Image: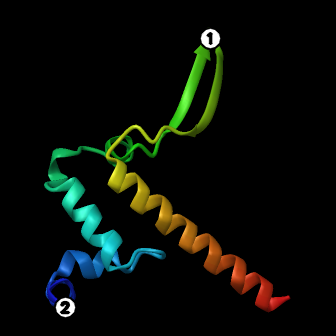
Amino acid sequence: KRLHQMWRNHSTIQRLQTIPGVGPIVAYTIIAALADIHRFKTAEQVASYAGLVPSERSSGEHVVRGGITHQGRSELCGAMVQAAWAVLRTKRSEREEAE
């Protein structure tokens, strides 16, 4: 109940929930993990902090990119991955209903 009351009165949480797949728990996790967002200069720095950047193996001019590293804040990475899966499941269900 207390979290729900805080959610209703927190403008940042309200804005975060406009992102597909982001509910109150993911929004709280983002706010808690990032704390002061102004310490990051770019979105790429936030993605790296969360562990949502591709792994990379390089040799000379040959670059191979792999899956995301998961080497950031585990709770933030996990919440963002779950939000992405929620969007994918929703989109898949909508496609299946249309067919």
Quarter of the image where the C terminus is located: bottom right
Q: Are marks 1 and 2 in contact (CB under 8 Å)?
A: no
Residue at x 27%, y 82% (from the top left corner)? 14
| Label located before the other in sequence (1 or 2) | 2
Please name the residue that numbered disc 2 is placed on.
1
Quarter of the image where the N terminus is located: bottom left
In the drawing, what numbered circle is on residue 78?
Answer: none
**Element at badge 1?**
strand
For discs 1 and 2, the disc positioned in front in the rendered view: 2
Q: Please, is residue 33 above or below residue 9 in the view?
A: above
Residue 42 left/right relative to 98: left
Quarter-of-image position of residue 85 = bottom right
Disc 2 residue type (three-letter): Lys
Please name the residue that numbered disc 1 is placed on.
59
Q: CA distance from mark 1 to mark 2?
A: 54 Å
Q: Residue furthest right?
A: 99
Disc 1 residue type (three-letter): Ser
Residue at x 31%, y 45% (from the top left corner)? 42
Quarter-of-image position of residue 19 = bottom left
